[in-house]
Image (tube, rainbow, N blue to C red):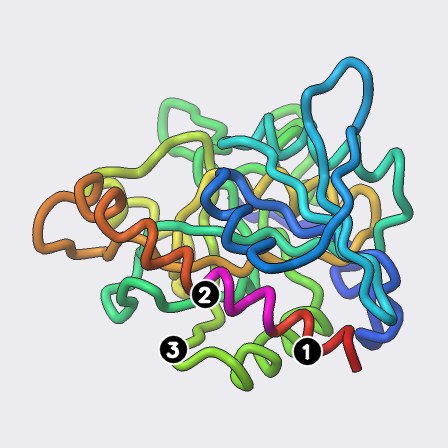
Amino acid sequence: MTISYQPYKSDILSNVAQIRCLLIVVAMESEEKSLIEDLEYEEISLGKNSSLTIKKIQLPTCDILIGRSGVGLVNAGILFTLVTEKYNVDAIIQTGVGGALNKSLNIGDIVVSKKIIQHDSIASDDKNNHLMAAGELFHSTPNNQQIDPVLRSDTTLKNWITSALSETFPGKVYEGTILSGSEFVGSKRKKECIATLDKEAMLVDMESAALAQLSRKASIAFISVKVVADKASPDTSIVTEYKTFLSAANTSTQLIMKSLQLTFNR
């Protein structure tokens, strides 16, 4: 089956100076603590019907909003909606930890997304499984009107964050594809299976696909910048390695924030 995907605009920014309000999304409390350590911020409630809050950090040229969504695609989508209804967000960075799909990655390395794919958004029939754009019709849509399931990161954001990290991060920074879905992928066999979806597959997480999808709909620049917390071929089990090295991975998350500060304090 030949599919011709509908084009969409993935590059929103022409330069970083356009960013006056940047939203950073993390899933877990430990990731949030890594970002806000030693920083002054204002904590703001996102509404009477929500227990979610954001931390607002004012820098000379940009307001940085830090939101902890909770784990998973739905939680990430809720945070996105509440924040973007209240603030005019120019760009979104999703950060925190993920699991390696590429054997060259080590604990603490950073992956900057070129593309995001929701690995569990599948349309199946008796012969094949087809990757489909999350939230979009597939079998009832003509092949020449399909929505592209591959969510591309904003090029300006990607180039900027990769360059900024090179000034502060002592480890390795990679660019590649992040696969994202509702499953915590704790099986080496499952990692190998989903990695076949894209030749540049580097890392798996549980929030990036929702934020990338919503950002595309809202025409907001998006990128995911994730730290490796477990390897593709662990010495023990993936789950054990994740628990053991989570704090070490969050140290790299701190350096991501330092890179952002260097840019917007200038």
Residue at left 43%, top 65%? Answer: 252
Compare residues 132 and 75 and report the one nearer the observer.
75
Magenta-colored span: 252-258
Q: Dot 2: within a 10 Å radius of its alpha carbon, few (fewer than 14), some, or many (20 or more) residues?
A: many
Is residue 152 depicted above or below 159 in this figure?
Answer: above
* Mark 1 or mark 2: whose residue is earlier in sequence: 2
**Res. 111 mark:** 2
Amino acid at pointer 2: Val
Amino acid at pointer 1: Leu
User: What x and y, as percent, mark residue 158?
Assistant: 63, 71
**Res. 94 mark:** none
User: What x and y, as percent, mark residue 155?
Assistant: 69, 71
Q: Dot 3: within a 10 Å radius of its alpha carbon, few (fewer than 14), some, or many (20 or more) residues?
A: few
Location of the C terminus (image quadrant): bottom right
Compare residues 237 and 114 and report the one nearer the observer.
237
In the figure, is residue 67 to the left or right of 226? right
Residue at left 50%, top 33%? Answer: 121
Please tell me whether mark 2 sits on a helix, a strand or a loop: strand
